[in-house]
Image (tube, rainbow, N blue to C red):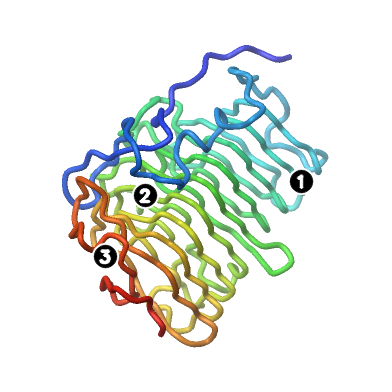
Amino acid sequence: MRLSATRIARPGVADAAAAQFTGPAAALRLRPSAGVMGGFPSAATTGYTAWPGYTGSLATYTGPMPIPASDTGTTFQGLRFTGATIGVPGAAPSDVTFRGCLFQTTAPNDWNVQDYGLRTTFEYCTFRPAATSTPPVSLAQSYQYGINHVGLSLTVRRCEFWGFGNGIQLGTSTQTNPVLVEDSYFHDAADQAGSTYHHDGILSNNGGSQMQYVTIRRNTIISGGNTNGIALQYDGAYYSNVTVVGNLLGGWGYAVNIGGNAAGNSNVVFTDNVLTTQIQPVHGELYGWKDGSGNTWRRNKWLVPAGAAYGNPADSGKYWWPDGTRNATDYTG
């Protein structure tokens, strides 16, 4: 049965957004403006209301939960979920697609979506709190993980995440079954002034032994918070075959962490990204970098927008080097 639903207000209502903030890692609250987000993903280009098939209402999902292994190959479209679990350990579906869906819940110590599946895809989906329609989001209103990925392989495309402790926590990826996060929008983490969450946009806390062949491209990953926007954290093994290209990054504790000090990383490509000073990170822009072993840092630049939390406007457009400096020429290390 298809039910009508009132369209839910979203945090952004224009093609571009401007920020209001007070000091390092402060809450990012969005309001209509022009030019700040440029061509990067925003609330207008991501989530279920940006889905070309959106009709102005969503049906409520009424099927079995957890979603059973028998739903292998199924596409779910235009649905509202109060949280979701995809499969169970040892019996999960493969090649399930969610398109134009809303996932909303209140679960400060738990997930919005738990994914045990193989090659799950989310396109034009929104992950948000159930308790409030606009940020800022308190701990009591929030959820801990937008997607807690405990399966193998994941694709996230043109999705919006806000009001979380961690946008996506990644499970496992391989060359045959990789992870791809592209054209998506991560913003307004929950409870930024609190100490309960380690705030992350895209998180792997298992280290590089399980997370290889990861591509993160053309996303906006900006929020106040205490940990990392890109949080590929070191835990006994470094990362290889990671591509981070064309993203708009800023804020957090460190905006970018790929393998901690990165000493053992290999084939990590970090190119054509923009570091915005819209929100000041608590610690710095980059946790660490290592040249050699196929690692590449090229054409990354600074953006100092009007009203930025920090930075000299004269540095806008300069090359971002991994030592944190702004330079007129590209890095060649």
Residue receiving disc 2: 222
Three-letter residue code for mark 1: Pro
Residue 79 image position (x, y, % from top left)? 64, 26
Residue 292 image position (x, y, % from top left)? 48, 87
Q: How many numbered discs sit on the rendered protein?
A: 3
Quarter containing the N terminus: top right
Sequence-wise, which precedes: disc 1 or disc 2? 1
Q: Is residue 114 left or right of residue 71?
A: left
Residue receiving disc 3: 284
* Distance CA(mark 2)–CA(mark 3): 14 Å
- Label at residue 250: none
Secondary structure, mark 1, is loop
Within 10 Å of the Cα at label 2, are there few (<14), some (14-19), or many (20+) other Cα atoms?
Answer: many
Of tags 1 and 2, the one toward the viewer is: 2
Please give the name of the residue rendered at 59% of the width and 37% of the height, measured from the top-left corner.
Answer: 124
Q: Are marks 1 and 3 in contact (CB under 8 Å)?
A: no
Sequence-wise, which precedes: disc 1 or disc 3? 1
Within 10 Å of the Cα at label 3, are there few (<14), some (14-19), or many (20+) other Cα atoms?
Answer: some
Quarter containing the C terminus: bottom left
Is residue 176 placed above or below 224 in the rendered structure? Answer: below
Residue 233 image position (x, y, % from top left)? 44, 67
Of tags 1 and 3, the one toward the viewer is: 3
Residue receiving disc 1: 93
Front-most of residues 170 and 7:
7
Sequence-wise, which precedes: disc 2 or disc 3? 2
Within 10 Å of the Cα at label 1, are there few (<14), some (14-19), or many (20+) other Cα atoms?
Answer: many
Three-letter residue code for mark 2: Ile
Please give the name of the residue rendered at 55% of the width and 67% of the height, measured from the top-left corner.
Answer: 243
Q: Are marks 2 and 3 in contact (CB under 8 Å)?
A: no
Q: Is residue 324 left or right of residue 69?
A: left
Please give the name of the residue rendered at 62% of the width and 59% of the height, measured from the top-left corner.
Answer: 179
Return the residue found at the far bottom.
292
